[in-house]
Image (cartoon, rainbow, N blue to C red):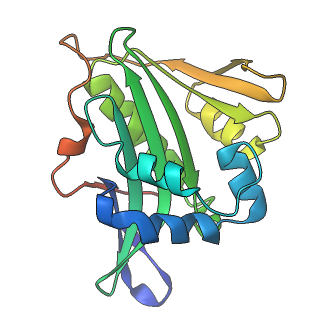
Amino acid sequence: MLRAKGSTDIRLILRPARLSDGDALQSYVRGLSQQSRYNRFLGAANELPASELARALGANGRDTVTLLLTLTAEDRETVVGEARVALSCVERAGEFSMSIADDWRRLGVGSALLEEIERKAAADGIEWLFGDTLRTNEGMIALARGHGFSLAAGLEPRLLRIQKRLDDPAPDLPCRKWNEIAGGAELSAA
């Protein structure tokens, strides 16, 4: 739990996106700075195209999930971060992407989100976690390095692949449903 100015209690919850979250997710994306949107979507974007929004909201299944990091303050929920995870159950590998609202950076929120992605992936039997980021995205590169990810060449010259072999992946069959997180997981950052 984080405590905000004025000693208001703030809870951050990580939960699967629901079909009803379209406006909240779109508002979150629109609220990111131009550079943050560029870094997250690897190119210029003011908002998610309708097809991508539908894909993000409909992703919650056996091998793909869209997660929202929400802030609840005074009984009002606001999206302050998001992540997409796609699992290759056969290869026991997971690809992820994520973003944190500009005002919530450098508070440990991104670190807490990445740790939860790693924890859940390992619990589901995933051995390798990876993602692609722009070579110029210093924040994501530093976050990944700080969590033990290595860097490799990306699919395009402008990209880097961040990758990590996860500690102690569950030995059972991978890819249980991520969207079975009842009510979400509370994250703490500091």
On-image quarter of the N terminus: bottom left
Q: Which residue: 84% across, 22% down?
A: 157
| Residue located at (57% from left, 25% from top) | 148
Q: Position of residue 27 (x, y in %)?
A: 53, 72
Identity of the residue furthest to the bottom in this view: 6
Q: Is residue 182 left or right of residue 102?
A: left
Q: Position of residue 112 (x, y in %)?
A: 45, 48
158 or 151: nearer the eye? 158
Query: Looking at the rendering, which quadrant does residue 126 occupy?
Result: top left
Left or right of 41? Residue 108 is: left
- Picture quadrant where residue 127 is located: top left
Residue at 39% in and 46% down: 66
Front residue of 57/154: it is 57
The residue positioned 54% from the left and 39% from the top of the image is 97
Residue 56 in the image: state x and y as whole percent.
Answer: 43, 48
Tell me residue 173's x, y (percent).
20, 13
Judged left or right of residue 106, residue 87 is left
Q: Is residue 53 above or below residue 176?
A: below
Name the foreground residue: 25 vs 181: 25
Q: Is residue 190 visible?
A: no
